[in-house]
Amino acid sequence: MGSGRTLLVLRHAKAAGEPGVNDIERPLTGGGRRDASAAGRWLLDRGITPDWVLCSSARRARETWAQISAVLGAAAPGQDAVSFEPRLYEAGAQDLLDLVNEQPNEARTLLTVGHNPASGQLVALLTRRLDIAFPACALAVVRVGESWAAAAPGGGELADLWIPRSSELPGPGPR
């Protein structure tokens, strides 16, 4: 694999919608925590680990990263390589791309932990693929070329996509 950059676009795992809870403080559900751990195992199984993380400051995104980080263990980036970024909470797809473009080139694999619709739209913007479903905890692996600054609409290639099994179930029945 060349010296290209790999962007991991992760939508936060399923969060509780408790009435009266401020949106930014919504915690993950039990299923959301399991999905996030499964996403971490999927990354480990493929030998893909981020060396730089941009995570939304919303609680559900921070908890999603905490689950993944715990699974990655020693392979997880250090605290100094994890940025809890308030801009990711309100970001649109172009805002996300702008953030990606600002990242240091020492980072070869960047993980964004964000929200929809922006996360799914960013994947579509980079890959020009409009057929990608992006449910809670979906994780896209996008190759974006030689530098973060050069990541541009249509300039990415979808290398892999993980969707939690809970999202594939038809209807609400238990499995």
Image (cartoon, rainbow, N blue to C red):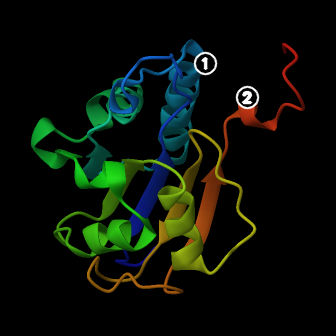
Q: Quadrant of the C terminus?
A: top right
Residue 5: quarter of image: bottom left
Characterize the local packing of mark 2: few (<14), some (14-19) or many (20 or more) Cα atoms within 10 angstroms: some
Q: Which residue is mark 1?
A: 31
Question: Residue 126, position in %: x, y?
Answer: 51, 77
Question: Residue 120, position in %: x, y?
Answer: 57, 59
What residue is drawn where x is 39% and y is 74%?
Answer: 94
What residue is drawn where x is 34% and y is 32%?
Answer: 24
> In the rendered structure, which amino acid carries the disc numbered 1?
Gly
- Determine the CA span between mark 2 and mark 1: 8 Å
Label 2 sits on a secondary structure element that is: helix
Q: Which residue is mark 2?
A: 166
Q: Residue furthest left?
A: 80
What residue is drawn where x is 32% and y is 27%?
Answer: 73
Label 1 sits on a secondary structure element that is: helix
How many marks can you see? 2
Callout 2 touching callout 1 (CB < 8 Å): yes
